[in-house]
């Protein structure tokens, strides 16, 4: 039977790594971060709303939204974050829902949503899975991937629900503290159960 699976985790916990592997296995994955990028694209309605709310100083020389500058603002101030969320989240949800409907009743769909539990979107899923790592690994991977210092990386992590809480709320968890191969084997097991309708 067709299922909607909500895939979540913390920032830099390995959601995209897991999603890419799941897609390689032939499953459909809709990634909220991809939709979020569309909302900030130059010329889109979201782009103009963001400039109205935050000011033209968040633009770079090409008049694109400077993601690093906007990130610095919103990950360090809950009110500013709320302001951006109010602009971007309804638009992200609208676009994701439209695409999800295209697949409905055809096959399983994975929704890769970092803020799945924070925004109550788990209620729209049949199953939820959290990709988790220790805080130490999360901090190290985030610092090295994004070239952030420890304080900025910690601010990003602290802007989200803790991974312990997400684990407790999930139907299933993937431990991504080891090698990627280890994560992939856990996913294989999950996909097998999904296809055998054991979940
Ligand atoms: C602030 C922005 C411009 C920073 O861009 P940047 O390229 O540095 O990060 P990217 O978009 O790749 O996001 C990386 C991760 O940050 C985390 N994150 C992003 N936005 C938020 C947020 N509002 N609250 C908490 N965590 C967030 C997520 O774990 C996400 O996977 C961008 O993240 C954004 O537009 N955020 C608002 C939309 C949103 O909430 N996206 C999260 C998924 S719905
Ligand atoms: N098992 C692993 N071992 C070592 N590095 C890993 C592992 N899994 C992922 N990484 C690396 O950690 C970083 C974060 O992984 P990834 O981008 O998949 O996380 P994410 O949860 O999608 O992040 P975000 O929330 O920011 O979108 C990347 O640089 C990735 O290459």
Image (cartoon, rainbow, N blue to C red):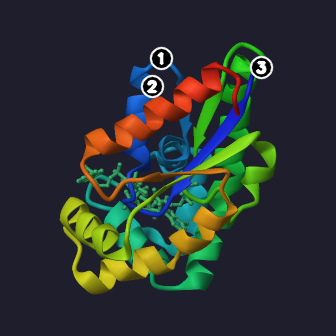
157 vs 143, left or right, is right
Q: Quadrant of the N terminus?
A: top right
Mark 2 or mark 3, which is nearer to you? 3
Task: Between residue 89 and residue 160, name the one nearer to us.
Answer: 160
> How far apart, in angstroms, are the residues tagged by discs 2 and 3?
19 Å
Cβ of mark 3 under 8 Å from ligand 1: the answer is no
Quick check: 70 above or below 184?
Answer: below
Q: Which residue is mark 2?
A: 23
Quick check: 183 above or below 85?
Answer: above
> How far apart, in angstroms, are the residues tagged by discs 1 and 3?
17 Å
> How far apart, in angstroms, are the residues tagged by discs 1 and 2?
5 Å
Give the class, few, some or many, for how many residues have Cα within 10 Å of label 2's Cα (few <14, many ≥20).
Answer: few
Q: Quadrant of the C terminus?
A: top right
Question: What is the x, y in percent for residue 155?
Answer: 41, 82
Q: Which residue is mark 3?
A: 1
* Residue positioned 37% across, 70% down in the render: 134
Determine contact: label 1, label 2, CB under 8 Å: yes
Q: Give the mark, 2 or 3, whose residue is nearer the N terminus.
A: 3
Cβ of mark 2 under 8 Å from ligand 2: the answer is no
Where residue 105 sits, quadrant-wise, is top right
Task: Between residue 53 and residue 193, name the one nearer to us.
Answer: 193
Residue 121 visible (yes or no): yes
Give the class, few, some or many, for how many residues have Cα within 10 Å of label 1's Cα (few <14, many ≥20).
Answer: few
Quick check: 88 above or below 166?
Answer: above
- Residue extending farthest to the top is 106
Determine contact: label 2, label 3, CB under 8 Å: no
Could you tell me which secondary element the residue under label 3 belongs to?
Answer: loop
Mark 1 or mark 3, which is nearer to you? 3
Q: Which residue is mark 1?
A: 26
Give the class, few, some or many, for how many residues have Cα within 10 Å of label 3's Cα (few <14, many ≥20).
Answer: few
């Amino acid at each position: 039977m067709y299922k909607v699976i909500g895939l979540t985790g913390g920032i830099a916990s390995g959601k995209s790594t897991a999603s890419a592997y799941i897609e390689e296995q032939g499953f459909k994955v809709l990634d909220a971060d991809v939709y979020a990028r569309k909302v900030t694209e130059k010329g889109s309605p979201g782009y103009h709303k963001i400039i109205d709310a935050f000011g033209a100083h968040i633009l770079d020389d090409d008049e694109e939204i400077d993601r690093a500058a906007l990130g610095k603002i919103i990950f360090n101030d809950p009110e500013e974050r709320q302001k951006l969320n109010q602009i971007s989240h309804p638009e992200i949800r609208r676009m994701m829902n439209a695409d999800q409907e295209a697949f409905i009743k055809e096959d399983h769909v994975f929704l890769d949503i970092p803020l799945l539990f924070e925004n109550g979107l788990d209620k729209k899923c049949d199953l939820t899975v959290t990709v988790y790592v220790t805080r130490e690994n999360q901090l190290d991977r985030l610092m090295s991937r994004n070239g952030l210092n420890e304080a900025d990386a910690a601010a990003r992590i602290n802007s989200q629900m803790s991974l312990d809480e997400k684990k407790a709320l999930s139907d299933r968890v993937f431990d991504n503290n080891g090698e990627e191969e280890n994560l992939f084997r856990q996913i294989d097991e999950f996909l097998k159960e999904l296809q055998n309708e054991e979940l």
